[in-house]
Amino acid sequence: MDHNTQKVVTRFAPSPTGFMHIGGVRTALYAYLWARKHNGTFILRIEDTDKEREVAGSIEHIQESLRWLGITWDYGPDSESTPFGSCIQSERLPSYLKYAQVLIEKGLAYADPYTEEEVAAFRAKATEEKRPFLYREHRPTKTEAWDGTKPLRLKVPEIKRYTWNDAVRGELSAGEEMLDDVVLIKSDGYPTYNFAHIIDDHEMGVTHIMRADEFISSQPKFLSIYDALGFEYPTFVTLPPILRDDRTKKLGKRDGAKDILEYRNEGYLPEAMINFLALIGWNPGTDQELFNEEELINTFEISRIQRAGAAFNEEKLLWTNKQHLVKKDPAFLFEYVEKALPQSLKGASGFTEEKLRRLVPTLIERIHVAAEISATAEAGECDFAFIAPTSYDVEMLKWKTDTDVKAVVPRLQKVVSLLSEADFSSPDIIKAALMPYAEEVGKGEVFSPLRISLSGKSQSPDPFTIAYIIGLEETLSRISFACDKIGG
C-alpha cells in the first residue's frame, strides 16, 4: 500500500477487560502522534467481542484515561456518526457476517463440524506423535452449509512461507507451520480478534497498525486472512516491549504495573507522563529529554522506534514530572499543593491561604509529585508553616560556641529589632536585613537559634524562608516564645 499518497489513519483498539496498562497507553500515544504529525485520522476502537472477559465500566475508563493524557480521537465509541459505522465491534456484527459470506462463496471458509471432544482427540494424537497440532490437517471432506450455530473457520488459501515487512523490525518471515484454519466467527455469533480487526482496519482505512511484539507470531495467520479477502496490507509497526527496571522481563502487574489513572491520582502531570512514555522505546535522535506535546508530534518518527525492549524507570518518571512541574505558574502550583495537603494541616489553627501560597515554592523544591506532599506533611516537615512550636528542648537553640543557652537571647532580641522594620516581601530581603549583623557576630550564632526558634525542629528550611512564610507578626511571636522558654 502506498502510504505516501494516502491520508494517514491510525487506531488504538483496546479490549474493555480492565485497567489501562502502561504498554497500551504507549501504543495509543505512538498511534496518536503519527496521525497528528501527518494531519491524519486517529481512531479509538473498542474490541469487545470476547464478552466473557469484558469488565463493566472499562470503555468509560479507557476514554477517561486517554482524555487525561490529552490523547484525543477523531472517531471513537462516543462519536455520533462516522464514515464507517460504529467504533465498537459488538455493534459491527453485520460487517463481519458480510465478509464471512464472501469467504464462504470463495470456498475459503467452512463450518466447523467437530465437537470439542473430537478436537481434543486430534490434539492428543498430535502430542502423542510429537508434532504440532494443525486444524487444517483435519478439514472435513464434505462441508455443510454454515448456519451460525457452529464456528466458521478459514480455509487457508495457500500453504506457504510468509515474508513481510515491518516498519521497525524490517523483513520478517515464518514457515507454513504457522498457518492454520483459524476460527473467524464463533458459535456465539461474535467474530474472533483474528478476523474482526482485519475487517475493521480495512473498512476504517487504517494505514498504520501499531501493536506489541506478541502479535508477530500471529502475523502469518493475519496475512492469510488478508489474502483470502483480497485486502492490501497496511504498514505494520511492531513496538518494543516495556521491561521491568532490571530489564529481565516485561513489566506486569506483579512488577508494580499500575492503572494509568493511578498515576493521575498520585499527582503526575499528563504532559510529564506522555513525555516519559514517548521515550520508552523511541529515540528522538538528539539529547533532548523534555518534550511538550507539540514537540513530540513534530519530532516523532517511526524509523526511530527501537527494536529492543526499553525499561520502565520509576526514578526517571519522577524526574520528568519534576521538570514539568517547576515550569507551572504559581496559580496552578497553589491548587496542586492545596489539593494534596492533608486535612490535618489545612485544619490547623494557624493555617491561612497566604501562608500556603508562600510555602508552595519551598514544598515544590522538595517533591517530585503530589503524592510526596502527604508523606512530607506526615513527617512533620510542613508543620512550621501553620503550627507554632509549643515545646522543645531549649538546649537546641545553643550555638556550638555558646557555653550557656542564655547567650542566644540578646542575639535573638537584636534580630527582633532588625526584623520589626524589615520588608517581608521575600526570603532574600529578610536575609539582607539580618546579614550585616550576622557577619558581625557570626552567622551560625545568629541564624541557627533563629531557625530553631521559628521551626522548633533541628531540621527545617532556612530561617528567612520560614519567616517569609509565616509573616512578621508570627515570626516575632515565635522568637519571643523562644526567649521566654530560655528564661533570659
Image (spheres, rainbow, N blue to C red):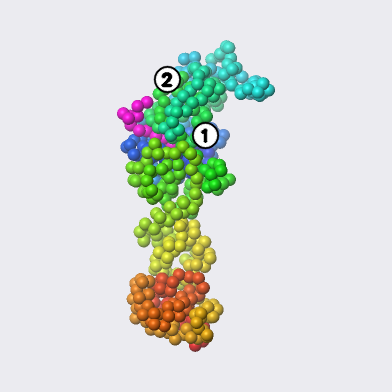
Looking at the image, is 222 positioned above or below residue 15?
above
Can you name the residue that lies furthest to the bottom here?
488
* Numbered range of the magenta stretch: 1-12
Can you name the residue that lies furthest to the top here?
142
| Residue 263 in picture, x, y percent from top left | 48, 50
400 or 30, which lies in front?
400
For image coordinates 48% across by 86% down, the residue present is 407
For image coordinates 61% across by 23% down, the residue present is 133
Disc assigned to residue 118: none
Q: Is residue 5 left or right of residue 384?
A: left
Disc assigned to residue 230: 2
Q: Is mark 2 on a helix, strand or loop?
A: loop
| Residue 334 in picture, x, y percent from top left | 40, 61
149 or 236, which lies in front?
236
Q: Is residue 243 left or right of residue 115?
A: left
For image coordinates 45% across by 82% down, the residue present is 480
The residue beneath circle 1 is 214
Q: Earlier in the sequence, mark 2 or mark 1?
A: 1
